[in-house]
Image (cartoon, rainbow, N blue to C red):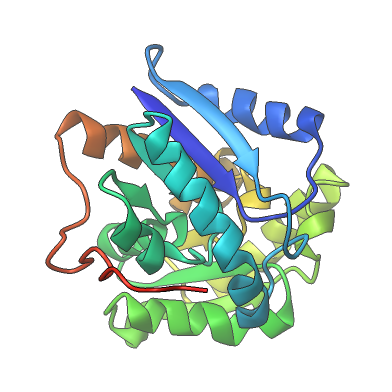
Amino acid sequence: MKLKVIIPNSGMSKETLKERELMLKSVAAKETEISVDCIEHGPESIESNYDEILAGKYIIDKVINAEREGYDAIIIYCGSDPAIAAAREIVNIPVIGPGKISMLIANDLAYKFSILTVLDQTIPHDEELVRKQGIDVTRLASVRSINIPVCDVRNDMEKTFNTLLEEGKKAIEVDGAHALVLACLGMAGMGKRLQEALKIPVIDPAFLAIKYAELLVTLNLKQSKKSYPIPPEKIRI
C-alpha cells in the first residue's frame, strides 16, 4: 500500500522530509510505501486556529493530488488535525487525523489521560479537541505544555525529551494521569522512551497514524460519505 503524509508546515527542506520518511518507515510494514511532503505556502507551523485556516487550502490541494497519484490513504501530520473534515469530504480514500485517533486510543487504554502540548496558548485548543471527539472531559486529567515552539521541538531533542519527562511526571503525580498523549508530531519518536521511564502508556500520534492507516486500508475502511459527503458542485472563485 502507498501512504501519503502531508505535513502542514511550509518551507521544510528535502533533507528534513526524508528524515521524517525514514523515521515513519521504521514502524510501517515492509510492503508499505510512505511519501512525506509539506505545504509550499502558509504558516511555518500550526499553533493556533488562525494557522489552521491559513494552511487549510494548501493542505486540501495536497490531499486532492495524493488521491490522483494513487495513494491508498492520507495522514495529515499534525496533532490539531487541520482541515481534516474538508479533506475527508473531498476524497474517497481514508484521511487520518493523528490527534483524533490518539485521544480515542488514550481514552480506551486509561480512565484518565493527559496531553503534553507545545505552548501554554495551545492548551485551550487541545482541551477543545477532546470535547470535539465526544470524550467525557472528566477523563482528561490535564493538558500540560513544554513551552517549546513547534519549529524548535526537534532542535534540541534531549532538552525536549527532558521537558516532556518533567511534565509527564507532573501529569501523573499531580493530575492523576494514567496515560499520556504527545500533542505535537514534532515529538515523534520520543514516546517509547517516555513510556519506559514513566511506566504508563504514552501515545505517539505519528507512529499510531501510520499503523491506523495501514489498518484501514487492509480492512477496506474509510470515512463514511454519510458523515463527510462530497461537496456540491458550484462556482468557487
Image point 54% across, 28% down: which residue?
35
Image point 87% across, 47% down: which residue?
155
Is residue 162 something that shows in the picture? yes
Residue most extreme to the top: 30
Q: Nearer the viewer, residue 192 or 77?
A: 77
Image point 85% across, 51% down: which residue?
159
Q: Is residue 39 above or below residue 234?
A: above
Q: Position of residue 23 (x, y in %)?
A: 61, 28
Q: Position of residue 87 (x, y in %)?
A: 39, 59
- Answer left or right for 201 relative to 234: right
- Answer left or right for 136 relative to 74: left
Is residue 210 something that shows in the picture? no
Q: Nearer the viewer, residue 132 or 226?
A: 226
Give residue 49's quadrant in the image. bottom right
Q: Position of residue 127 (x, y in %)?
A: 49, 83
- Answer left or right for 219 relative to 216: left
Q: Is residue 143 above or below residue 198?
A: below
